Image: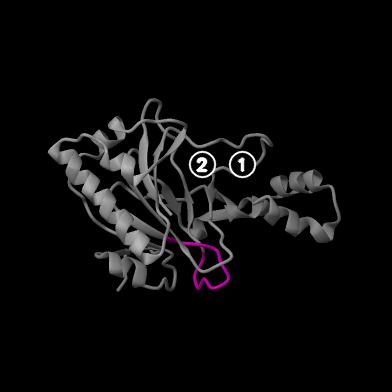
Amino acid sequence: MIHPSSDRPQTGTVFTFSELVGTPFQGMVNALCWKREPDGDFKEIADKLQLKENITEVSVEDLCALQLSESGCTARETILNDIRLLTDFGASPSLNLLRCYERDEELGFISTDVYSYHVDRSTVGTDTFLCTYHGDASDILPNDQALQKILVPEIREKLRKLHNGPEAEFETFLKEYYFDLHYEPMPDAQPVNLGTGHLWRLAVDHPEQQVLPCIHRAPVENEGEYRLLLIC
């Protein structure tokens, strides 16, 4: 059962993993939160993991090899349990230690990186799951508080010039390069921060989806701080 938030009508709260994966999105709700406050020291895990690249995927073996305090071990068990639950559900969770994502600033007038508000798209019925254990968390944006970037006249005109092809192929061009997935917040938009420790399920744009896809973005990381994130 979804417990919708009166001030955040696009989000709902559940209290078990089975509710998280088994509750269909409905109405305006396109983001479900398994609300929880897990015990343990997740910062210790982030500090002891080895960052090899800006985004380092952490294997279960790497996680289990860490020498941790009792509080760190408690945090590790939460992560391992989340990985088990999602894997048994049929998902492919990835635990990432992040310094930063790659920026897309080549065009200047439009960005298609994860720091831009965007939706995820899939050709099959699926959802996005994510949990930030340590560091800043992502934001989501109500769909009625966002405007698709390709509908902004100035941006659309520049994209037409970039396309420089037949008008009949313009919409295909926008999808091929993922321009249509990105959004601008309206002036009075009120983003919702996903917080740490909670496991979220976000609606994805796909043919079987019954609700609007969830608009979200990654936070800009603070210098010298890492994020520990589970995503699939």
- Whether pointer 2 and pointer 1 mark residues with C-beta atoms closer than 8 Å, the reply is yes
Furthest toward the right, the residue is 166
Q: Is residue 168 left or right of residue 3?
A: right
Q: Using the rendered image of the protein, determine whether residue 40 is visible from the camera's viewpoint.
A: no
**Which one is nearer the viewer's eye here, 106 or 191?**
106
Q: Quadrant of residue 8?
A: bottom left
Query: What residue sits 37% from the left and 38% below the top?
Result: 227
Tell me the amino acid under the disc marked 2. Tyr
Q: Using the rendered image of the protein, determine whether residue 127 is visible from the camera's viewpoint.
A: yes
Q: Is residue 15 left or right of residue 194?
A: left
Between the residue at mark 2 and the residue at mark 1, the CA separation in whole angstroms equals 8 Å
Residue designated by label 1: 111
Query: What residue sits 23% from the left and 55% below the top?
Result: 36
Magenta span of residues:
202-212
Quadrant for the C terminus in the image: bottom left
Furthest toward the left, the residue is 70
Q: Is residue 207 magenta?
A: yes
The crowding category of the residue bearing disc 1, from other C-alpha atoms within 10 Å (few below 14, some 14 to 19, many at least 20), is some
Tell me the amino acid under the disc marked 1. Ser
Query: How far across and down, in percent of the image, does residue 216 sit?
Result: 47, 51
**Which one is nearer the viewer's eye here, 77 or 1?**
77
- Find numbered disc 1 in the image and state the secondary structure of the residue it sits on: loop
Residue designated by label 2: 115
Quadrant for the N terminus in the image: bottom left
